[in-house]
Amino acid sequence: MNVHDLSLNLAEALLRTSTQEPPEKKNPTKTPFTVAISREVGALGTTVATELGKRLDWPVYDQELIHKIAEEFGRPSVRLRGLDERPVSWLEEFLSNLASEYHVSPTAYFKKLVGVVRGLGAIGKCVVVGRGSNFILPRESTLRVRLVANLPDRVTAIGRLKGISDKEAARFIERTEQDRVLFMKKHFEIDVTDPHHYDLVLNMSYVGVEDAADIIVHTLRRFDKRRELNAPREAETVAVG
């Protein structure tokens, strides 16, 4: 079976089975790398991830994460968008619970999200956009990338994407960025904007999408080569690409 065709449901199933003691192997295979992309709002995170996925022939998980988690809960995906990368107060949760038969608690959503992302990391060879994946996945098998861009360029990008004015785009960026920062602080107790959390930081105001994908692929292969050189002689290694 091609691991690229594995569903997120299977990824989560693999996570559950991974809690059991695996049989001892004489030549254990290292987990293939995953690329986790953190991004500022309007820094072309999904665009770069898509280009990267094409070059590596790896699946990309962005909004697909929400759709699959919604399937797991048996809820319309639109009902989970209010939980996606944003903190939810107890009052919002209470009112949502009263108002909707499709209510999913933020705690249940986050646990499911962590399980799915970890399951994808156990399979490897994929690109995950946002959702704290940089801090959920193990460092030894994850290339952690942060994409940033100058505010005017991000305003332009969001304005074009959503068909709104610059003023509306700026407000959207400020609100969404604040939600993401608070989401990360709440669940991971980190400052997502701190560059020390990442292996690679690219300013998309000066680096084109194709160049960004090239740089990430090159860095990924260097990481894989370094791991191969540092591995014990008897261990098998997995090549990237």
Image: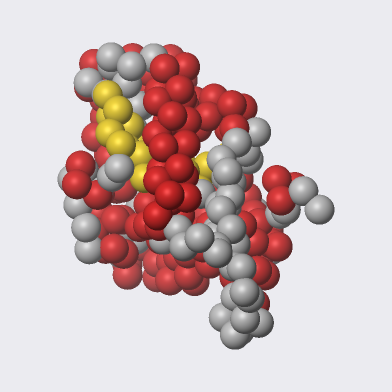
Q: Position of residue 229 (x, y in %)?
A: 43, 49
Q: Residue 230 falls in which quadrant of the image?
A: bottom left
Residue at image location 46% in from the left, 62% down from the top: 232
Residue 11 versus residue 5 in the image, above or below: below
Residue at image location 65% in from the left, 33% down from the top: 57
In the image, is 233 to the left or to the right of 189? right
Residue at image location 61% in from the left, 27% down from the top: 54
Residue 150 versus residue 236 in the image, above or below: above
In the image, is 228 to the left or to the right of 206? right
Q: Residue lying at the far front in this picture: please name it.
A: 233
Q: Position of residue 64 (x, y in %)?
A: 60, 45
Residue 214 versus residue 201 in the image, above or below: above
Closer to the camera in the image, 136 or 110? 136
Closer to the camera in the image, 152 or 148? 148
Residue at image location 45% in from the left, 22% down from the top: 214
Q: Position of residue 216 (x, y in %)?
A: 42, 31
Residue 204 versus residue 41 in the image, above or below: above
Q: Is residue 208 visible?
A: yes
Q: Residue lying at the far bottom in this picture: please name it.
A: 21
Quarter in which the C terminus is drawn: top right
Name the colour scheme.
Answer: secondary structure
Q: Is residue 73 visible?
A: no
Closer to the camera in the image, 149 or 98? 149
Q: Position of residue 101 (x, y in %)?
A: 60, 66
Closer to the camera in the image, 172 or 206? 206
Numbered disc total = 0
